Image (spheres, rainbow, N blue to C red):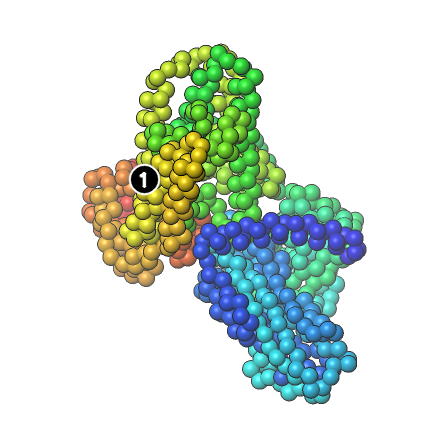
Amino acid sequence: MAASSQAAIRGRMKFTQLIVSTAFWFVAFAATTVSAEFSPAETVKTEHAFSELLVERQGFAPGETTWFALRQELQLGWHVYWKNPGDSGLPLSLTWTLPEGYTAGEPVYPTPERIIIEPLANYGHHGEPVFMAAVTAPEDAQVGDEIVVEVSAFWLICAEICVPEEGQFRLTLPVVEAPTLNTRGAAIIEEARTLTPVSHDGAAVFSAHSEKMELQVDWANRPAPRDVYFFPVLEGLVEPVAAQTFTVQDGSLTIGMTPGYGAEISELDEIEGVLRVSNNSDVQGYEINATIDESVAVSPGRQIFTGNNVASVPLLLVMAFFGGVLLNIMPCVFPILFIKAASVVKSAHGEQSIVRRHGLLYTAGVLATFAALGGLLLALRAGGQHLGWGFHLQSPIVVGFSAYILFLVGLSLAGLFHVGENLQGVGSGMAGRGGSAGAFFTGVLAVFVAAPCIGPLLSAPMGAAILLPPAIGMLIFLLMALGLAAPYLAISFSPALGRMLPRPGPWMEVFKQTLSFPVFAAAAFLLWVLASQTGVDGLAKALTGAIFLAFAAWLFEKSKGDGKRALFVRIGAGVAILLALAPLSQLKTAEAASSGVMHYGAIDAEVYDEGSLDSLRAAGRPVFIDFTAAWCVTCQFDRITIFSKNSVARAFEEMDVTLMVADWTSRDPVITEALESFNANGVPLYVYYPPTGSPQVLPLPLTENTVLRAIKDGEEAR
């Protein structure tokens, strides 16, 4: 590959990895993950992995190479990444600290595996991967010297979430004429060599077309493989989640692949990668360096959709816009919109240019915040995060902080404190100014409040936004933002609409105070979610913080004015805010119930357990599984309405159906794997296991008739 082309491609990748790395550290903090101890050692125990640094020989020899290995024991269900992580993730990073003249080579990875996490696919490693690296001593190394080798390792380990972990390792080795083998280290490294790809000694040719790619590999005098997958080193060359096809004919193995998000084939001299070949239980990796057939090589040019899928993009954009409009009628967003609309009522007969400017600034605030949240979500997707706008609500800290924000908004609407002198005070206080700054930051606040209130029409656009190329995904988020801002923007630019609104008067203050109660209700809902995650202890801490928050708001209102007294009161308000936030840092997810019976609507339900499910299935008992979460409003609506109906409870009892509840309120890898087995990555999900036959995923939205029909059909097929 030409040096300039390599540099250009590496530059694009480094920029992407920088964004993703920043997001990973944010997620790690929000999830209160545990990082490695920073005192160097031969072994490091982190939250999800045990890692050790091994060496093949008990010393260095002048001018010779000594092999080291980072061996890891990964927690069950977790994986780390290959050099090309696939749809998401980051590869292993090793930073060596060596004496002058000593050099370390690049990590040597085991043969990768394809890890499906619908709707994504990663390239990585499970179990106990071993990563090797060679360290070469200088020719003039002095026999008798003690050499300190330090390695700083960083890896991203993922299951249903991704956690950045790291470790500091140190080994001290002598320089000797003829180093002896380190028995354990040599054995592990020798075994690791058998699991790394070997060089393929035949020809390989790569060709790219507008809708497909092919790799032809010389396969003469080799048995036909049972399964084949090509892992390119270059990110974005192929679509990881798409299946690859292969045929063997006339001594040639041909692998068909779907183009990825847009590697420029014209810039490359060759295609590097690993061909994973499976024959029954045997797996062998082959290093491939394929030449490019320039007669048919065409850059796929960010080819994502083929056929009818292209037509779905305009529909998604329309749904995103109107879904954003509908956000304005969600209970927790409407009060914020009223604050802006009320300001228009107040100034309807004033300067129209000011009203328009405020409308544009409010829209700018909405757009900027949606762009920031959308960009972060896309970065988290690259870090292994799953679909679902509500994933952030699996963190008790985020839930508690969101409840605090809504509580403060409610207190302001109720009149306990006022920021600024007009109805835009909630927003303007964030800038410490009135007018234009207030309009912008009220838009910011509207989006923040709207985050847990995703409404109709938005499921498909939000799911597609993090599957499509980043440009299209960001366009979806921005159209959602435009939809959210559209009603106020229309009022701002249409004097006729403004004059249709009621004239300002004392009723506005009463109405504003009335609207504080739905905001308090939204805060109460989040506190209920928090109690589900952390138990009564977490709820008590949050309520204690809420008391300090209310006290801080009261002090803030009393601090208005000048002089030392006002300054001291403001300091008191600041201290109260710190005391309010302190309990949030102590919130921890409580242990979920592992067994027992719970009341679920009008039905007695069991906690989801794979062992119990297998036993019930073996006995021929029908099972209904409700994958749910406390922060899922749709899930709670279904529980209150459908599962509380006597007809549904009677059907469960008469047909001896066991209801199992898989509660995903907090992170649970077992439930995540169960969801993935049904090609799902979010809740709600309803699955019915009939007495005989395959499980049935019920369509959404769930209805009483859907549940009854599934149970009846399953019984009739017995």
Query: Which residue is depicted at the point 46% across and 61% down?
Result: 34
- In the image, taking residue 296 as reference, residue 342 lies left or right, namely left
Rendering coords of residue 511 (x, y %): 34, 22
Residue at numbered disc 1: 524
Give the x, y percent position of residue 577: 40, 44
> Does residue 247 sit above or below 480 in this rendering?
below
Q: Residue at x 65, y 69 (%)?
A: 96
Quarter of the rendering containing residue 289: bottom right
Residue 293 rendering spot, x and y as whole percentages: 77, 53
> Mark 1: which amino acid?
Ala
Dividing the picture into quadrants, the one containing residue 436 is top right
Q: Is residue 273 visible?
A: yes
**Residue 408 visible from this viewpoint:** no
- 22 shown above or below 132: above
Bin the neighbour count of mark 1 within 10 Å (Cα to Cα): few under 14, some 14-19, many 20 and up. some
Residue 228, image quadrant: bottom right
Observer-nearest of 357 and 138: 357
Looking at the picture, does residue 309 appear above or below residue 5? above
> Residue at image x 59%, y 57%?
90
Which of the image's four quarters has the N terminus? bottom right
Residue at figure coordinates x 64%, y 46% from the top left? 261
As drawn, is 452 to the left or to the right of 208?
left
At mark 1, the secondary structure is helix
Most foreground residue, 402 or 618: 402
Q: Position of residue 641 (x, y in %)?
A: 27, 37
Q: Is residue 592 left or right of residue 603?
A: right
662 or 167: nearer the eye?
167
